[in-house]
Amino acid sequence: MSNLPKGGSFLFGQTNPQDIFTPEDFTLEHNMIYRTTAGFVNDSILTRMDELESKKEGLIRELLEAAGELGLNGADIPEDYDGMNMDKISITIIAECIGRSGSFAMTHGGQTGIGSMPIVMFGSNEQKKKYLPGIVSGKKVGAYALTEPGAGSDALSARTRADLSPDGNYYILNGTKQFITNAGMADIFIVYAKIDGDKFTAFIVDGDSNGLSTGVEEHKMGIKGSSTRSVIFEDVKVPVENLLFEIGKGHVVAFNILNLGRYKLSANALGNAKYALELAATYANDRKQFGTPIANFGLIKEKLAEMAIRTYVAESMVYRTGGLLENILHSLDTSGDDGGQIAAKGIEEYAIECSMNKIFATEVQAYSVDEGVQIHGGYGFSSEYTIERLYRDARIYRIFEGTNEINRVLIPSTLLRRAAKGDLPLQEAIEKLKGEIRSGDLIREGEAGLVQAAKDIFLLTMGAGLQKYGKDLQKNQEIVGRLADMAIRAFAMESAWLRAQKAVANEGEAKAKLKLSMARTYINAVVGLLEYSAKETLAALAEDEELASLLEDLQRLTKYTTRNTVALRQEIAAAISESGKYVV
């Protein structure tokens, strides 16, 4: 583990392209899993989407059991409990392919992620034996009950209460949870409650428990085929052996599970963005106006190209992070009874990257479905066309698993906390950059130089923030949010460029041409946005001579010659139109 990069360390050094994982590194087994999962989604789910959206009785369970037969429910679960115990790349592939499946993706995510991973990582051996095989087969449905009417992002303010019964055999739960996915059919609930009103603790609650009831189905904007209800606990008796992990350690369970949940959600969003691009490219090829396919019009080309570019960047980030997660888990001994907790700690190392992926991929998804509707024109607003459903379904992705705003706050605050512990050289990097600026020792040429410039812009701005606010910087969310965006864009730029460089080294420049074009276009387009954001932020952090000096330093970091990105986008759009889908 000591030789592996620390979470967030990409900001403070160079990464060898050969050290990152990319989709071009898929093994034969990975490709087989991709084909199997995509085939299941295309043949068994998308063909029945109307039935799914109308909540046909029993269909969700039928599909979950079919997924179970293919091994798609137990990818994260050890073989001792009937799971497949797949590597994190395989798990990412499954999540990406399932992302195309609309409402089913929500149900499956609740089943294989937040609804079961608390047991996988924090459950006792007896709890795992009792509950996990049913999750794997799909015969039991899992749900995660954290959110309450008055406790969303502030989960620790939950009011659901647990009190030990006089005989010491049960905890008695009272309270209400809200917006719970799979609630209408769940057999197993992961529930968070405060013992004696103050010890935040996780429990496994059977769905058929006396006193447990659910509200009516929520009438949602999208993901209509999934079950979303409130869950009410009225003197529900939970056996003491169903307490999950330790009393008062519910936050450890909840927050560690959310790291993996955010990562998987980013893979879901990636698959959905690819689907939107496929629908848009196919429609643009078929739809004719003024005697020619609209795919030949410049502004449609730009839309298709930009959808593809952002999807490529998201894909590069997601699988790079998947490689990080796989490497750290491979380095750990998870064979003991506490193996799940050790794995959770390993995943927590990359909490920053998980949050960055969640934000970036869900916002790429949002962009792609929106432009997909625009390319469809009036037909995109009609429910007869699939893109209309994708547009509605996508909106929730930026809200759950921690809103994108909450995740933006988490990124700089986690960096600052780790730097304070000595785990990341933040202050050293800021001082080093100041020295380089003063000495004029700055060489930022080509795309690799712009990637470094992005990191430098973040460090310059973070330094100004710390200079003004010190430890109180985290209280200024407008500044923190902009710093998060700078870090995300730096990671995005670097991931796209490293993938392209690895492809050039391994396949030759000719085969890697499209990847290079996508990376170059994204980097050149975004560096200007970074510069503007930094100016806006610095103006909020300094005045007069200090501000003038900071802006002068910023200007030194952002001297570059812009590429012809219009021509690059035309090249990318031509490749997308020719294939009718996302290609690299």
Image (cartoon, grey):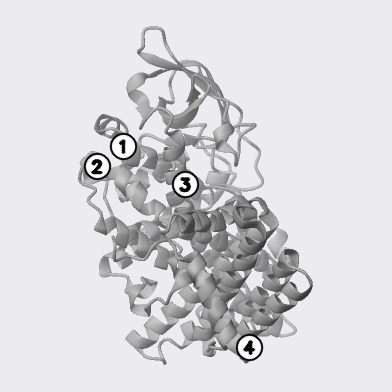
What amino acid is at disc 4? Lys
The answer to the question of whether label 4 and label 3 lie on touching residues, with beta carbons closer than 8 A, is: no
Q: Earlier in the sequence, mark 1 or mark 2?
A: 2
Badge 1: residue crowd in 10 Å (few <14, some 14–19, many ≥20):
many
Badge 4: residue crowd in 10 Å (few <14, some 14–19, many ≥20):
some
Q: Earlier in the sequence, mark 3 or mark 1?
A: 1
Residue drawn where x is 48% and y is 55% of the image: 420
What amino acid is at disc 3? Leu
Q: Position of residue 339 (x, y in %)?
A: 26, 44
Q: Which is closer to the viewer, label 4 or label 1?
A: 4
Q: What's the CA distance linking mark 1 and mark 2?
A: 8 Å
Identify the disc placed on residue 82: 2
The answer to the question of whether label 1 and label 2 lie on touching residues, with beta carbons closer than 8 A, is: yes
Identify the disc placed on residue 559: 4
Q: Is residue 279 left or right of residue 28?
A: right
Q: What's the CA distance linking mark 3 and mark 1?
A: 19 Å
Q: Earlier in the sequence, mark 4 or mark 3?
A: 3
Badge 3: residue crowd in 10 Å (few <14, some 14–19, many ≥20):
many
What residue is disc 1 on? 132
In front of the other: 125 or 381: 125
What residue is disc 3 on? 258
